[in-house]
Image: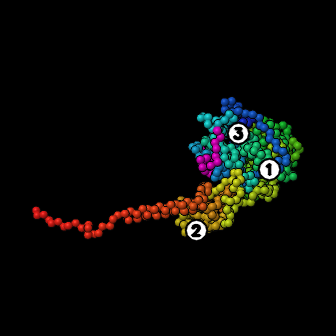
Amino acid sequence: MALPSISLIGATVSILIYFFALPYSITAGENLLHQSPAARSRRPMVFPLFHSQPNSSSSRSISIPHRKLHKSDSKSLPHSHMRLYDDLLINGYYTTRLWIGTPPQMFALIVDSGSTVTYVPCSDCEQCGKHQDPKFQPELSSTYQPVKCNMDCNCDDDKEQCVYEREYAEHSSSKGVLGEDLISFGNESQLTPQRAVFGCETVETGDLYSQRADGIIGLGQGDLSLVDQLVDKGLISNSFGLCYGGMDVGGGSMILGGFDYPSDMIFTDSDPDRSPYYNIDLTGIRVAGKQLSLNSRVFDGEHGTVLDSGTTYAYLPDAAFAAFEEAVMREVSPLKQIDGPDPNFKDTCFLVAASNDVTELSKIFPAVEMIFKSGQSWPLSPENYMFRHSKVHGAYCLGVFPNGKDHTTLLGGIVVRNTLVVYDRENSKVGFWRTNCSELSDRLHIDGAPPPATLPSNDSNPSRNSSSDIQGEIQIGQINLDLQLTVNSSYLKPRIEELSKLLSKELDVKSSQVSLSNLTSKGNESLIRMVVVPPEPSTWFSNVTATNIVSRFTNHQIKLPEIFGNYQLVNYKLEPPRKRTNNNIVVTAIGIIAVIIGLSAYGAWLIWKRKQTSIPYKPVDEAIVAEQELQPI
């Protein structure tokens, strides 16, 4: 079953470890199935789960501590609301935006609950692919620090710096050094920028090399997990939520930390000691109200039922898949069955109708329910187990597959589309709530996040604001953005002033704060450099404001007339404020220098005058010498 438009990312399924290393210690135990664009004509494959045997010389392991926070403490902690981008079946993953460093550098990272480390390509990486954003440049961050070699980590050959390495089931890998820097979570987060340890890649192989996303944000259970780091510092409660957009919608939301859950959310137990991955107590499946004739233990084989946000589809043990497929086919028997997108694989696909309306699927395909040990059930709509055929209009295919020799049940992102999933690690449970993920903030009334950031008003002076003393506050003196527009430069040049005014209006700033330059042309496209500065030389932008400006261009929230075509942000740079000398000191210094120069000049004049008066006056006549006669030759 392969789709030209589908890539499988992050199937964390082949190397599961029961233990995690001490702080900064890494073992090759996470498995995402990454599929490059070139491999989209292949069926995403799942490899059998097996245990890795940690090398005693390269890894150290202890059991995972189970973190608990006092109830009174957890309620008062902030959370970070972050948007999700891309589409699960088109891109193979969802990403979120993180900013690292001072000034902040932006990255698009794959959201993966099965990964325990966050990493981005490093500037000195010679074997890293071309991704969505520029590589991280530690040398440009004033707050970056390498994690020095210590007894609790794996070290490089020189025994100077901690390193990490990850190997994945489909033979891709990531390795590099560990660094620590400020991480910013965007302008919708209650969290201020926080220091965290992350991986700075020096080598990428396989699909990690070819994917468009920059790297991975690790949400799994482990000391290097971003969630664990924030929890250990007491910054958020031990919980996070993911909400994936529905079919043809994409996007969604991620929330780091606890929030008020809906009262009708369905919870199931999740045993943290069973594996480092998030599992649920699945005991049965209903199709069209009829429970499949299966022993409940079929869902408890190997590592049980694993919930992994980085996996695209769902994979059931062979017996469970056979029963599920048969039940679905029985309910849709009038539909014509057709071949899948790839003739090399036998997919279960149906020709529904000439219409391609997703809202009609629930009238055609049966309702499915996941049954938990508690007796509660979690309803699935067709978009949670079907995907659109990439070659036949109006056709859909089953997004559930057999897991081969592996007896683990793996539920990927397709199963939780338009579903808020809460990973309540503090109470060892996972919750589900059907919702429109594109409207999650409004439906849950998630509050406390600051309003969308705007540039300082004309009479503001952020440099005098007490907020500048807040730990982690980053000051930006200039924002440089390289924009590519789909119009020729010869057409754009006479309209450059008009474009500058339009951009300043969109950003709600004075026209004097925006300047355009470096206009170059490449075919029918133009590249321009846009510079945004604060209203006054003595002011600066906060990192929240600066990242919001960049995000508005990245997410195409800036609206321009059609005459300027479409635009794309191809690069950006945030520069710190230039060092300013105190004006009073400058004026005083200039005054002192002027006085010194004046006194020196006056003194020189007096000396010269005195010398002139000491020379005796001689009449002109006394200086005349008598004329001598010329001697004959």
Q: Amino acid at mark 1?
A: Leu
Structural crowding at the residue carrying mark 2, measured as other residues with C-alpha within 10 Å and reported as few (<14), some (14–19) or many (≥20): some
Q: Which residue is mark 2?
A: 497
The main secondary structure of the magenta stretch is: loop
- Between the C-alphas of marks 1 and 2, the distance is 47 Å
Look at the image and give the residue range highlighted in magenta.
Answer: 128-148
**Which residue is at 88% across, 46% downward?**
376
Work out whether residue 397 or residue 254 is closer to the camera in this orientation and state it: 254
User: In the displayed structure, does residue 339 sit left or right of residue 273?
Assistant: left
Whether residue 129 is visible here, answered yes or no, is no
Most foreground residue, 309 or 260 = 260
Give the CA distance from mark 3 to mark 2: 52 Å
Q: CA distance from mark 1 to mark 3?
A: 30 Å
Amino acid type shown at disc 3:
Glu
- Describe residue 104's horizontal placement relative to residue 252 as left or right: left
Tell which tag, 1 or 2, sits nearer the viewer. 1
Question: Tag 2's secondary structure?
Answer: helix
The residue wearing badge 3 is: 30
Q: Secondary structure at mark 3?
A: loop
Q: Name which of mark 1 and mark 3 comes first in the sequence.
A: 3
Q: Residue at x 75, y 54 (%)?
A: 190
Q: Which mark is residue 77?
A: 1
Q: Position of residue 608 (x, y in %)?
A: 40, 63
Quadrant housing residue 557? bottom right
Q: Hey, what amino acid is under mark 2?
A: Glu
The crowd level at tag 1 (other Cα within 10 Å; few <14, some 14-19, many 20+) is some
Image quadrant where one finds the C terminus: bottom left
Quarter of the image containing the N terminus?
A: top right
Magenta-span inclusion, residue 97:
no
Position of 604 relative to 33 (above/below): below
